[in-house]
Image: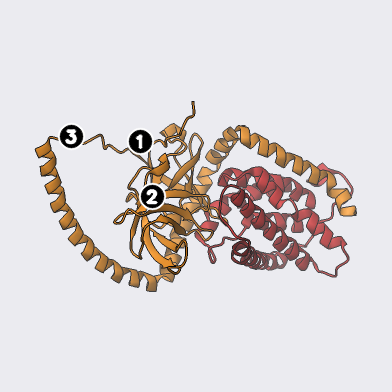
Chain colours: A red, B orange
Amino acid sequence: MKGFLAILATVFACVWQVTVAPLFPVGGLTFDFVLLMLVVIAAFGTPRRAMVCVPVAALAYGFLADRAPGLVLLAYLPMLPLGVYLEQSGVPLNHFAQTALAMVATGAWVRLLLVLGAVLGGADGSAGVVLLDFILPGIFLDFALLCVVYVPLRLLGWSGQGMSLQRGGYYSSL
Amino acid sequence: MLIFQRYSWWVATMIGFALFLALAGQVGVLNPFQGLFLRTTSPIESVLNGVFRPVASLLSDAGEVGDVRDENSRLRLENEDLRNQVAELQQNSEDIKGLRDALALTQGDTSVKYVAADVVHRDASPFTDVVTINRGSSDGIEVGMVVVSTKGTLMGKVTKVTSANAFVRLITDTQSKVSAEIVLTGADGSVKGTPNRGLTFDLAQGEIQVGDEIVTAGLGGGFPRGLPIGRVSEVSGTSQDLYKKVTVEPGVRVGTAENVLVRTDFIPETLGLD
């Protein structure tokens, strides 16, 4: 049931991303609510739910925004392995720091990949413009959005889970 | 490493799935699913639009009071100029009519057909400015049709159609390129979208100055001639520069338009080699 709710929430985040997010731009950029939803599912739910929700998000967002779903899938793909790497790398980071790092790094990768997709499609764009106007401000936006959401979730009693994949049944924890 | 041992099968599956999606997208297998998905989610979009558009509009207006005041005083002056021009043009029109009658010329078919549509959502991620409208192939919309504002200013072009929806690449998208010309001087070039969803005019030849009106040139067959695009807001660069940097202010607020018109009588020309 929770897995089904996570999928519904992911689809809703995609609809929100193309309907509401563009109405409230910050410096010409929009918050990435799809990434936020995936990170929240991975960090507060289970990694297995996130493993299902990533391709769902790619399809839903690709369909809604008329982007190549394959490209969107590759964009959001590093989030989980990166989260696990941060957990197991031995770097002394608490749950928030790990989650934030996974989010901003994936967010930067998402923006970079989507810009590359546009440039390959014929758009003009220099590396300086991409970095200064989109990647760096995007990192700030992703971090700010996570802060706004993370603290209330912890106050509501949601406990942060690890992103590491445990041995065991797949369907039982979905 | 352990993480990749545990996740390797999933990452590999996802990369394979991404490749499958890329191939399926190329051959159009995904289109029916996309149409179905858009139709399924449209009620949610309508509700979200109904709730949040007024809020965004209110916030936008509140944040732009100073700008609106300046714009208002500028528009008053412009309005006076335009009234004078209209009077002059009406006089010219009468003269032309008289001359046509005298020469017994008949005007060609100027009937222009439009389909009105609502903007249901927008993808405004970096370098991209695409909107979705609630009209599709069942309403006679085809790929390549030109989309204008309710006042007739060029907004973009239909790039993909499902049965109930169509995607419109706005002129402010970085992949958009429109052959254009200055109304008064006829200097031509191309209008392109910029990464920050603005417009720039790459001048091929001719002089240009701030305030010049830019319209479509009709070259290449992608757009009809004479559609208003915007006006030159800034010209930078020295006389030594090969090309000056020309910034264009769109004639319509492209990103916040709620209603658009699709021109259904104009089908872009394609050059066949056979």
Q: Amino acid at mark 3?
A: Thr
- Provide the residue designation for mark 2: B154
Q: Residue at x 42, y 41 (%)?
A: B220
- Please indicate, yes or no, whether residue B251 appears anywhere in the rendered image: no
Return the disc, 2 or 1, that comes first in the chain's sequence.
Answer: 2
Residue at 27% x, 37% y: name it. B111
Residue A171 lies in what quarter of the image? top right
Q: Earlier in the sequence, mark 3 or mark 1?
A: 3
Given the image, on which type of amino acid does mark 1 rest? Asp
- Quarter of the rendering containing residue B69: bottom left
Q: Secondary structure at mark 2?
A: strand
The disc label shown at residue B265, or none = 1
Q: Which mark is residue B138?
A: none
Give the CA separation, mark 2 to mark 1: 15 Å
Tell me the quarter of the image containing the N terminus of chain A.
top right
Q: Are marks 2 and 1 on the same chain?
A: yes
Q: Could you tell me which residue is drawn at 54 percent across and 53 percent down?
A: B128
Q: Nearer the viewer, residue B49 or B103?
A: B103
Instruction: Decide which of tag 2 and tag 3 comes sooner along the chain.
Output: 3
What residue is shown with label 3? B106
Query: Horizontal and vertical percent for residue B207?
Result: 36, 61
Q: Nearer the viewer, residue B211 or B209?
A: B209
Q: Secondary structure at mark 1?
A: loop
Report in which chain the residue with disc 3 lies.
B
Q: Is residue B106 visible?
A: yes
Cα gap from disc 2 to disc 3, whole angstroms: 28 Å
**Given the current orientation, which residue lies at the most extreme top position?**
B274
Q: Marks 3 and 1, Cα distance to the nearest angstrom? A: 21 Å
Percent x, y for residue B267? Answer: 40, 35
Crowd band around label 2 with a 10 angstrom C-alpha radius: few (<14), some (14–19), many (20+): many
